């Protein structure tokens, strides 16, 4: 009996010792709080953050595929591809977006000119738009011919642009109360000279990843040959520039003049004072000079990009302005700006109100610029110009002095 008890005690002792050993080993294998925290951090890394946006945009001048360009296209085996057939010389693949001035309504109205080409009204056929959409991200409509088919023609133009995923901005009206333009009747739903245009950007993250995202810009356009837009339109530009990076693309100036006038200089400098990023204008049908004002770019006229005029050596030439932009996360919450951009792509009408209501810090943009001379001489097909025109256009722009004065 005593022997049995000793055996039981021994067994219990061994069991107790084994249990204690297991506890010790378990505690040795248990990670410390620091080790556990490290494991948890490794398992759930923080979401990558955007460090900056980068983009390269091309701003081009007067664009129009009606009248004689349409005649050449219809006579060519290229058809509607004709006026776009050499744009590859400008390297569209190197840009996130192209923005140009569409100087015609796009409707099914046909071509309103006589056999002698005495123009009554401009019009561009809509079957060119699928080709245009391969190059253009947005068109300005704030010019003196966009309303040539009346209010219904403007609505049709917008419909066709939307169907081809081309954004638009500006109005052919000169003021919100403009009733003098018989081609474009007063309509309170069509008075804005500014709109939000959502452009692609390259987003770089803190983990090195790069993605294609979106950023909403303000774009403003209005027209005037011998005058300037009304105070209401100027105030609208000021309102946009206060909350969102805004670019002004006026359609103004006296035609066929090689340099700007004082009226335009005073207005465009005032737009810079309002806070716009740059002023890139067209309408005179020839390239004019440029300047740096308070470190920002003003181009007084970029000339005809795609147009049918051929009566002298000036009118087939243009200056396509390349804008390189960087926006860093230190200046604004880029994730939230991208979110707004995505919302704006889905709902253009309420976009500016959403941006205003969000009350985000307006980002600081760093720009650098270049120019590329183009020509459509000989065949009305725009393309990159040769060395002689590159040098000549650079001199006309006064480019060396302008770029020396731009903010670095």
Image: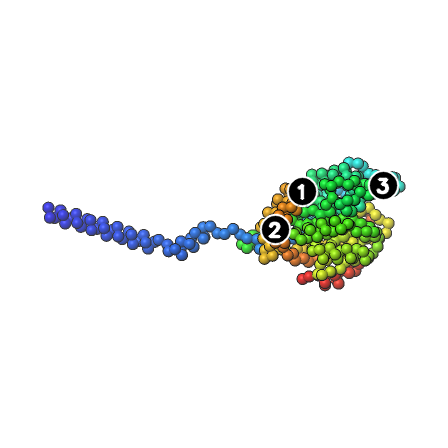
Q: Is residue 46 left or right of residue 225?
A: left
- Local secondary structure at mark 3: loop
Above or below for 316 versus 153: below
Give the label on residue 120, or none: 3
Q: Earlier in the sequence, mark 3 or mark 2?
A: 3
Q: Earlier in the sequence, mark 1 or mark 3?
A: 3
User: Residue 145 in the image: x percent, y percent?
Assistant: 80, 44
Q: Earlier in the sequence, mark 1 or mark 2?
A: 1
Residue 399 lies in what quarter of the image? bottom right
Give the label on residue 270, or none: none
Work out how far the residue at label 3 is from the one at label 2, CA to CA, in angstroms.
47 Å
Q: Which residue is at 81% across, 56% downward?
A: 263
Q: Which residue is mark 1?
A: 349
Q: Which residue is mark 2?
A: 359
Work out how far the residue at label 1 is from the one at label 3, CA to CA, in angstroms.
32 Å
Q: Which one is closest to the eye, mark 3 or mark 2?
A: 2
User: Residue 91 in the image: x percent, y percent?
Assistant: 70, 51
Q: Which residue is at 66% across, 51% downward?
A: 244
Determine crowd level at label 1: few under 14, some 14-19, many 20+ residues with C-alpha closer than 10 A.
few
Work out how far the residue at label 1 is from the one at label 2, CA to CA, in angstroms.
18 Å
């Amino acid at each position: 009996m005593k022997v049995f008890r000793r055996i039981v005690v021994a067994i219990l002792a061994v069991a107790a010792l084994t249990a204690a050993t297991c506890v010790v080993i378990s505690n040795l294998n248990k990670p410390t709080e620091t080790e556990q925290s490290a494991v948890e951090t490794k398992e759930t890394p923080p979401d990558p953050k955007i460090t900056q946006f980068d983009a390269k945009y091309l701003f081009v001048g007067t664009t129009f595929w009606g009248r004689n360009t349409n005649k050449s296209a219809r006579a060519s085996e290229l058809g509607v591809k004709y006026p776009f057939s050499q744009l590859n010389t400008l390297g569209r693949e190197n840009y996130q977006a192209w923005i140009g001035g569409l100087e015609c309504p796009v409707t099914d109205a046909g071509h309103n000119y006589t056999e002698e080409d005495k123009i009554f009204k401009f019009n561009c056929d809509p079957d060119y738009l699928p080709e245009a959409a391969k190059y253009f991200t947005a068109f300005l409509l704030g010019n003196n011919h966009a309303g040539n088919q009346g209010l219904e023609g403007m609505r049709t133009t917008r419909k066709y642009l939307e169907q081809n995923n081309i954004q638009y901005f500006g109005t052919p009206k000169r003021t919100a109360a403009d009733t003098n333009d018989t081609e474009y009747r007063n309509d309170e739903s069509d008075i804005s000279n500014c709109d939000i245009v959502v452009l692609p950007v390259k987003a770089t993250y803190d983990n090195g990843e790069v993605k294609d995202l979106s950023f909403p810009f303000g774009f403003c356009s209005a027209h005037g040959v011998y005058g300037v837009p009304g105070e209401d339109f100027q105030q609208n530009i000021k309102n946009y520039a206060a909350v969102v990076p805004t670019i002004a693309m006026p359609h103004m100036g006296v035609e066929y003049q090689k340099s700007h006038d004082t009226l335009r200089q005073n207005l465009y400098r005032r737009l810079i004072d309002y806070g716009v990023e740059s002023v890139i204008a067209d309408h005179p049908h020839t390239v004019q000079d440029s300047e740096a004002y308070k470190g920002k770019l003003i181009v007084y006229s970029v000339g005809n990009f795609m147009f049918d005029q051929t009566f002298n050596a000036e009118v087939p030439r243009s200056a396509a302005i390349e804008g390189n932009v960087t926006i860093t996360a230190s200046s604004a919450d880029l994730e939230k700006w991208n979110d707004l951009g995505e919302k704006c792509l889905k709902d253009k009408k309420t976009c500016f109100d959403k941006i205003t209501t969000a009350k985000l810090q307006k980002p600081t943009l760093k720009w650098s610029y270049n120019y590329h001379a183009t020509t459509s001489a000989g065949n009305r097909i725009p393309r990159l110009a040769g060395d002689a025109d590159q040098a000549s256009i650079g001199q006309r722009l006064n480019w060396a002095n302008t770029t020396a004065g731009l903010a670095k």
